[in-house]
Image (tube, rainbow, N blue to C red):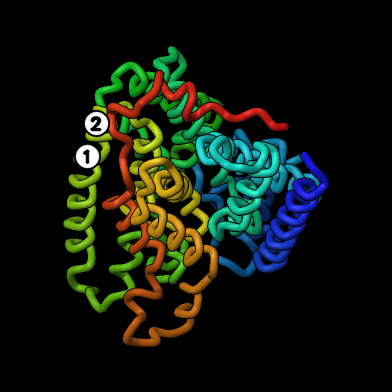
Amino acid sequence: MTRRAWTIAALAAIISAGVLWWAADLHFFFDSRVYSGAVRYWFRDDGMVYDWLQDGTPYGFTYPPFAGLAMLPMAYLPFGLVLVIAGAATVASTALVTWWLAGPIIRRSRWTPGLAGSVAVALALCFEPVRETFGFGQVNTVLLALVAGDVLFGVARGRKWGGIGIGLATAIKLTPGVFILYLLVTGRWRAAGTAIAAATAATLIAAGLFPDESREFWTAALWDTNRVGNLEYLSNQSLRGLLARLPLDSVEAQVWLVCVLATLAFWVWRVRAAARSGDHLAGLALTGLLGCLISPVTWVHHCVWLLPAIVRCVDAGLSADRDRRALWLGGAAYVVLTSRLTWAWENGPRPPLAIIGSNLYVWFSLALLIWMPLRASSRVEAPDEQRIAAPAVT
């Protein structure tokens, strides 16, 4: 790269590093503290992992036992090293996913792939759900990378191992299980079977090693909504969160069920259309949106799953077809959801725009689900080899 290119790349890195530092100072790696404290209590103090709560809060370990097994090193590593590993994992997984998703945009850019890729990664790291994942010390981008790699390089190419990533992600944090539904709805039976087998095997291994913890999770901790916080809290950007912030107490559950079924039906229609044209990236994007919408709890940092849809919209707007509507939708979603605008409604209703402002992630998720463009079958190239593969850095 030229000196000017290196300067731009360095500036992008400095800005993204500053944003991540601010996010870490804001949230102080709260979730990593919960993970570390819980697994220490479990493996070093011989306590029940689901009994442990962060001091002064109702928050404890909410993941399946297999996730705790995967986090076992946290029980013995210094907490500072845990934070370094968690932060590096978020940055690395975000960079990897960005290379996969934005590859076509990077290759069409007038900049060198190294410069364009550096700017793309910096933009991804500044996206609020990603920087919140870093600041909380969460695992969202790692799970996104695990699922995206599986869908784009395993399932899409008919690999025998296709589905394993989805299965392991589901065993760690149940919400990626929506991608098993994606495999079933689109008729990818072998991959669905592999995903189910991987999730089941991981869960049974954890149950065999830790029967008491497994029994506690599946019979009690999983159903205790108090462990994850109030549904109406602004950070819950799911359909259930939107309804919880409305005066619908007596019929909220029934309305939510209707909304979930309607969203599922629309998603099935769109995702099958994507499958018919071999558009695996659209399948990934649409299913990520579905998971955020129908989950009872979707905190802002969970919304890293919106990234594939946003990138698809920007790609469509900058491609030869110049889909300006898609470009405006993707650009607006990125800018608004990076701005923290929705937090203006954190401490009060502030009518009459509260129903819009306090649910910005929900509205953009719905808009992306409806209007995100699919790739026409006539434009599909040999199974994602050219459109998905990561470009070389120069």
Type of the residue with mark 1:
Val
Q: Nearer the viewer, residue 335 or 192?
A: 335
Q: Secondary structure at mark 1?
A: helix
Picture layout, residue 72 above or below residue 276: below
User: Which is nearer the N-term, disc 2 or disc 1?
Assistant: 2
**Distance (Cα) linking label 2 and label 1:** 7 Å
Q: Residue at x 28, y 68 (%)?
A: 243
Asked if marks 2 and 1 touch (Cβ < 8 Å), the reply is yes
Type of the residue with mark 2:
Val
Q: Position of residue 215 (x, y in %)?
A: 44, 38
Q: Nearer the viewer, residue 293 or 314?
A: 314
Q: Position of residue 299 (x, y in %)?
A: 47, 59
Q: Is residue 292 left or right of residue 34?
A: left
Q: Quadrant of the C terminus?
A: top right
Q: What is the residue that sits farthest to the top in this orientation? A: 160
Q: Residues within 10 Å of mark 1 (few under 14, many from 20)?
A: some
Q: Is residue 394 left or right of residue 104?
A: right
Q: Quadrant of residue 108?
A: top right
Q: Position of residue 66 (x, y in %)?
A: 53, 34
Q: Quadrant of residue 237?
A: bottom left
Q: Residue at x 18, y 45 (%)?
A: 265
Q: Residues within 10 Å of mark 2 (few under 14, many from 20)?
A: some
Q: Is residue 237 left or right of residue 277?
A: right
Q: Position of residue 180 (x, y in %)?
A: 34, 31
Q: Quadrant of the N terminus?
A: top right
Read off the residue under disc 2.
185
Read off the residue under disc 1.
268
Q: Residue at x 29, y 33 (%)?
A: 376
Confirm whether residue 201 shows in the render.
Answer: no
Q: Nearer the viewer, residue 259 or 36?
A: 259
